[in-house]
Image (cartoon, helix red, strand yellow):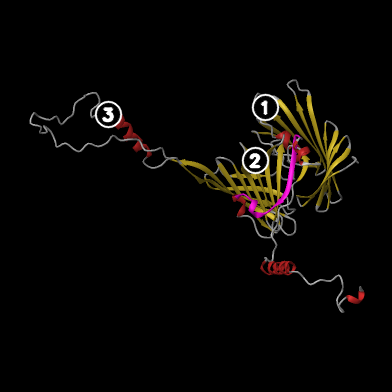
Amino acid sequence: MMQNMRPGRHPLKRAPSFQFLFSTLLFFMFLITAPLTPPLFAQETVWYISNGAGLALYPAPSRIVALRSDYCLGMSIISRSSLPQELLAYYQSPYTVDFRTLYEKGKPKRLQWVFRDDRGASRLTAVADIKDGSPSLTFIERYGESDLLVEERQFSEEEQITTVYFYEKGVLVRSETRVETLFTIKPEGADSAASDANDANDDPQGDAGSGQHDDAQTESGESAGAEEEPARPPATPDEPVEPQKEWRETSFWTDYYRYSRSHSLREVQRIVHAGAPQALTLSFPQLKPRPEFDRNFVHPHTTYNSTFLNETLSSDSVSEVAYTIDDRGRTLVESHYDETGALISEVKNNWVRDRLASVEWRSFDNEGAVLERRLAEYEYDAKDNRVMERNYVNGVLERTVRTEGRQEIEELHIDGKVVLRAIWEDGRKITEERVRGRQ
């Protein structure tokens, strides 16, 4: 058998087929004609069990299991062609788009798009709420190359608010805010046309109720009055014209931010350009003795405090807020009252030297008994930088935030054990993990 083989040819090697040569030619033609930057292909959706705020708590084993939960989150990377028309103007070639859908009881509730650059940093975040089965944008946040917020847009059915921020060496120095309102415009002549049509319908034969013509004919057939004009068909109302709508700028103002030598915000001054509320200057108390201060003063429905307490302080039932300050202008007690003047909640600030050591919030029932108690404790390093925050609800630890350089490590606790850990850098979340086994 070996003697019958042709010399110089391996028994397993064969001449290349026509199909192989043709496919190779097509491959090289594709390499030549393909763009330098390959297109981004959409990725398969990853499912998570979440809460009502859209926070991914832990992965779901399947889409069916996720949709059976009260809240779930579907996350994927989509291509430019899948973006809504309102976001196409913000897209640039190097961006990747994270797309998230929040479901409530199996139905989509909110959509979110996050544009990321080649560094992985967020450059734009947009959110749309789903109403009556269709999404409607609620806000857009755009970030610059230095990861600072440069533009913020808020949308509603009747109003659009756009705020642009300006910085100097990373410090916010001013912002410009424009408010646009949706107006309805009636078509010109619509009222007069409708009036003519109504008049014609009311008197189709001349004078109403007379039953006779002004130009009666004589026996000879001649007109006794003026020459008779050719008869015109009765006026009919035009088809209804849809009113037009357009956006008009109704307010425009500029806020200027001024700081002390230690870079702490001391004053915000508002200059009104058009249509906005009256000019405003908001000054912060100085840290030097001011005996002339009124230590007790009242503001109508204004609250400012820790983010941990924002949810409780933003209650619609708060009608009046009273402050008690010390001789250095620091707030000691912040009391919230309803429309009847009854105390419904109270915030107490505990100061140690010039540092805020803790903030305690308590709510009360009609008889003055405590309903709920929240406490935020703070720790500082030798340079008076805040390095730790602990949040308690009714004496139970629920959240800690530890600062390490530019990063903040946020941990959520249940029964005294860590269940979720997130890392923030310069105010932006970069990682998030569910702690297994509850450390």
State the residue at coordinates (29%, 32%).
Answer: 200
Name the mark on residue 338.
1
Location of mark 3 (residue): 203
State the residue at coordinates (78%, 26%).
Answer: 371
Task: Return the disc, 1 or 3, that comes first in the chain's sequence.
Answer: 3
Q: Amino acid at mark 2?
A: Asp
CA distance separating discs 1 and 2: 31 Å
* Label 3 environment density (alpha carbons within 10 Å; few <14, some 14–19, many ≥20): few
Residue 42 spot, x, y in % from top left: 71, 53
Q: Amino acid at mark 1?
A: Asp
* Label 1 environment density (alpha carbons within 10 Å; few <14, some 14–19, many ≥20): some
**Rendering quarter of residue 154:** top right
Q: SS class of the residue under badge 3?
A: loop
CB contact under 8 Å: marks 1 and 2: no
Q: SS class of the residue under badge 2?
A: strand
Q: Is residue 74 magenta?
A: yes
Please, which residue is most extreme toward the bottom here? 7
Residue 347 spot, x, y in % from top left: 76, 33
Location of mark 2 (residue): 129
Task: Return the disc, 1 or 2, that comes first in the chain's sequence.
Answer: 2
**Rendering quarter of residue 309:** top right
Pick the residue in front: 31 or 19.
19
CA distance separating discs 1 and 3: 62 Å
Q: What's drawn in magenta, residue-wise?
A: 69-84
Say whether residue 46 is left or right of residue 251.
Answer: right
Report if residue 423 is visible in the image.
Answer: no
**Rendering quarter of residue 26:** bottom right
